[in-house]
Amino acid sequence: MQPEGTTQNTTRSSGGCTACPSQCASDEDAGFELTSAFQRFSQRNDIFSRSFWDDSVPREQFYDSYRKPLEEWRHVDGYQQKDFALRNAGWHVADLFAERLEHEDRREGFLDYLTAHRDGPEHPADVGSPEENAADIKQAAKVFGADLVGVTFLDERWVYTHKYSREHENETTRDLPEGLTSAIVVCHEMPHDLLQTVPSALSGTATGVGYSRDVVTLLALAQYVRNLGYRAYASMNDTALSIPLAIKAGLGEYGRHGMLITRDFGPRVRIGKVFTDLPLAHDRPRPFGVREFCERCRKCSDACPPRAIANGPPSETVHNRSNLQGVSKWTTDAEKCFKFWVKQVTDCSICVRVCPYNRNYPRWLLRLRTRLMGTFLRTFVLWLDDRLGHGERVAPRSWWARAKSAG
């Protein structure tokens, strides 16, 4: 590994790709506003890692609730044994891979990239042009279960400076090899009906299922690339920040609540990526008016119980060490957000539920509505969303009842 702060591959270190500058997007194209104060991020400082080494971040029963005997939990609608049972089952595949090599101080998918691969051939295959390869990759990703897929260059700025060792509670050297030039970014839709029950343990099933689907898709996609004789590393929440790469890959825009907003599913997605040296053409950002809409909309910030979501314009505000420095954007206070999670003993997606981009209309109507949200009619769409009562919570017992009646 090279010393931190330097690079051997200019494709990975700049705001634009030097390998294909006429095609790849700049920071301006992606809507990124970085200042001279920008600092890359160490995974030790994300809120989940901090909950293990920083006493100011409580974790109490939060992680235990995914593994402890379920009958101990409270008997409240949405938090009963069957709700936790379904949520934890949704996480099962992702957890199996996360725990597979914990004895080697690897928590794959969350602190380390996935390694359950077979070796590929010794010599790379004679593949087509970067454009042909990108088309093949997208088709393969869809076969393996991805709902959205895009390709961008691997920008070093969004790769973590260090990994985090949960066993030793400290930073450790990152192990992503040099010479990787592209990030294949995939998204999986989370079930809309489950997210309507937020806050609840039942709604956490949507998150777990998303991560479990990520494992299957990313491992298969990386193995496909390896079978061609090229390097590929499957990554979930580990190794690099997903949202900037997804935006550069043309999959969506950044929202007020700090999440990726996609055209087809709004913020209702989980994001994964595969890092590779397979020659690939890169996509460009595809803005569709999210920033302008979020500047007017306050549904997520108004609905957030701990008031963790920014209510004003994008800024360089740094709430605590779990925030990026030197980036002008809407920044969520991760400490306030996670403390609410801990109190609920499950993840919270209220901001996703209320987001006007998170609606389950027929495809043609959804596309028309999303297009209008990017025009001067955005105020009307927001008013209509309020009038129709969209984004209101559905009682978890209604979800179970609906499932029974459908059967």
Image: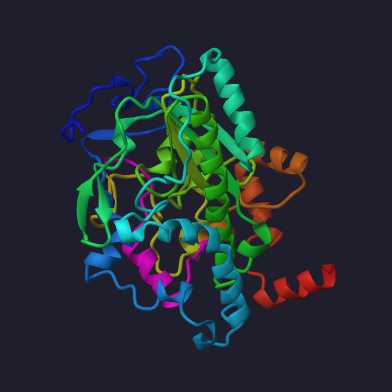
| 350 versus 227 height, above or below | below
Please tell me which residue lies in front, 62 or 177: 177
Find out whether residue 329 is within the magenta segment.
yes
Q: Residue at x 39, y 55 (%)?
A: 310
Please tell me which residue lies in front, 77 or 387: 77
Asked if residue 197 can be seen in this view, the reply is: yes
| 368 versus 152 height, above or below | below
| Percent x, y of residue 51 | 29, 66
Instruction: Give the side of residue 228 with respect to residue 176, left or right.
Output: right
Instruction: Give the side of residue 28 with respect to residue 214, left or right.
Output: left
Asked if residue 318 can be seen in this view, the reply is: no
| Percent x, y of residue 81 | 59, 82
| Percent x, y of residue 184 | 49, 32
**Magenta extent:** 326-350
Instruction: Give the side of residue 115 with respect to residue 389, left or right.
Output: left
Q: How many marks?
A: 0
| Percent x, y of residue 37 | 19, 38
Q: Residue at x 64, y 36 (%)?
A: 142
| 9 versus 249 height, above or below | above
Give residue 2's quadrant in the image.
Answer: top left
Find out whether residue 44 is within the magenta segment.
no
| 390 versus 214 height, above or below | below
Quarter placement of the N terminus: top left
Q: Residue at x 45, y 34 (%)?
A: 119
Please tell me which residue lies in front, 45 or 232: 232
